[in-house]
Amino acid sequence: MKWTYTLSEPTLDDDEAQAAADCIRSGWLSMGPRTQAFEERFAEMHGAKHAFAVANGTAALHLAYLAMGLGDDDRAGDAPGEIIQPSMSFVAAANMTIAVGAKPVFADIVSLAEPTIDPAHVAKLITGRTRAVVVMHYGGYPARIAELMDICAARGVPIIEDACHGPAQAVPSLGGRKLGTFGAVGCFSFFANKNMTCGEGGMVITDDDALAARLKAQRSHGMTTLSWERHKGRAATYDVTAHGFNYRIDDLRSAVGLVQLGKLEAANAARRRHAEAYAAAFAAYKDERLQYVFADHVKAGTAHVGAVLVPAAQRGAVRQALADQGIQTSLHYPPIHLFTAFGGRSHPDLDRTEAFAGRVITLPLYPGLPDDAPREIAEAVWKAVG
Ligand SMILES: *Cc1c(COP(=O)(O)O)cnc(C)c1O
């Protein structure tokens, strides 16, 4: 299939190619000076004390859970601790919950217009077994983070931010702080369809020194030093002080990530412009069957996805009509609780999540999308709905 408009395209040019080539010519490919520079720049841009680059966003979440001890009940032979999280998300946070021996407890979304985790439902779900709440900023649009922080702080439950959609997104109502800095740990992904990419990659950020030490150690086998440090003569040997993984990134990808980081604000701005064009085009039809998601505050996020709601009964036909016109679409997301491995059963407490998932279509949205494409694609949706 040759698409006229693909769902997503990375923005890469000679700068990334040059950075990768420079890294190869330097003779040092594994984690080293470029990764350190990437981490320092990322931490600085987000106003975080510590940043650690990792293999991917899923590894970032896994390390966050481990560092916070979320699987400790299971390891002690007790009933699993619970991690409250949205079902309207990518499956990684839920899979890593199972990986550490904890139990995912799914919360509903606020509304169909605001598909982020509902603070009121979170408050009801918190019990003595709750070990953490995962907040995911759908599309890079801030979840109700102030309310969630109040609820969780009052009950002594830490927050982990799955900020994979929201790098470099400030929240003006909260002093301009960036997404990923409100929780104990913030997790990011640099997969090829994200707002910045290095192929596969991720980042964990935190202001907590003790968590930082554990994140850093468990990224690399629980070892106390890295090859790079030994190469530089800063260390002669190492100890293993925890049980860890190899979740390291490499300098080849950090070199690319560093270039992408420099372009991130401009890339996010271009996405916001396209999202505004979508919102304006859908609004112009004055057709209540069509609702552009986050239309009311379309500029407040990174516009990682452009999502529109159509009538559930027509969703398949609309996607087919768009595909016939060369317009690629997707679904963000099939609810996690409906996946076979997570029970596969409808849940009355998650009715807004299920309604949203039945109506949503995600449309092409990336910085290099032609300026007239959102209007053209919106028109194709409108015509297909009939
Ligand atoms: C992409 C993504 C992840 C996982 O990141 P990977 O780098 O693909 O492992 C987790 N959560 C959300 C919301 C994502 O969009």
Image (cartoon, rainbow, N blue to C red):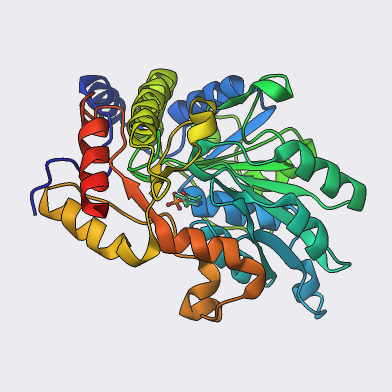
Q: Is residue 141 above or below residue 56?
A: above
Viewer-proximal residue, 189 or 231? Answer: 189
Residue occupying the point 48% across, 30% down: 298
Residue occupying the point 18% across, 46% down: 327
Q: Going by the image, does 40 lie left or right of 100?
A: left
Q: Going by the image, does 223 lie left or right of 232?
A: right
Q: Quadrant of residue 169?
A: top right
Viewer-proximal residue, 82 or 208? Answer: 82
Q: Considering the image in quadrants, where does the N terminus appear?
A: bottom left
Q: Quadrant of residue 343?
A: bottom right
Q: Could you say where residue 226 lies in the image, as x and y percent from the top left? A: 55, 41
Q: Could you say where residue 55 lies in the image, as x and y percent from the top left? A: 46, 48
* Viewer can see residue 218: no
Q: Quadrant of residue 149?
A: top right
Q: Could you say where residue 347 lies in the image, as x and y percent from the top left? A: 61, 75
* Viewer can see residue 291: yes
Q: Could you say where residue 262 lies in the image, as x and y percent from the top left? A: 41, 18
Q: Going by the image, does 331 lie left or right of 153?
A: left
Viewer-proximal residue, 227 or 317? Answer: 317
**Numbered label tally:** 0
Residue occupying the point 82% across, 75% down: 76
Residue occupying the point 74% across, 61% down: 70
Q: Is residue 47 above or below residue 224?
A: above
Viewer-proximal residue, 355 or 65? Answer: 355
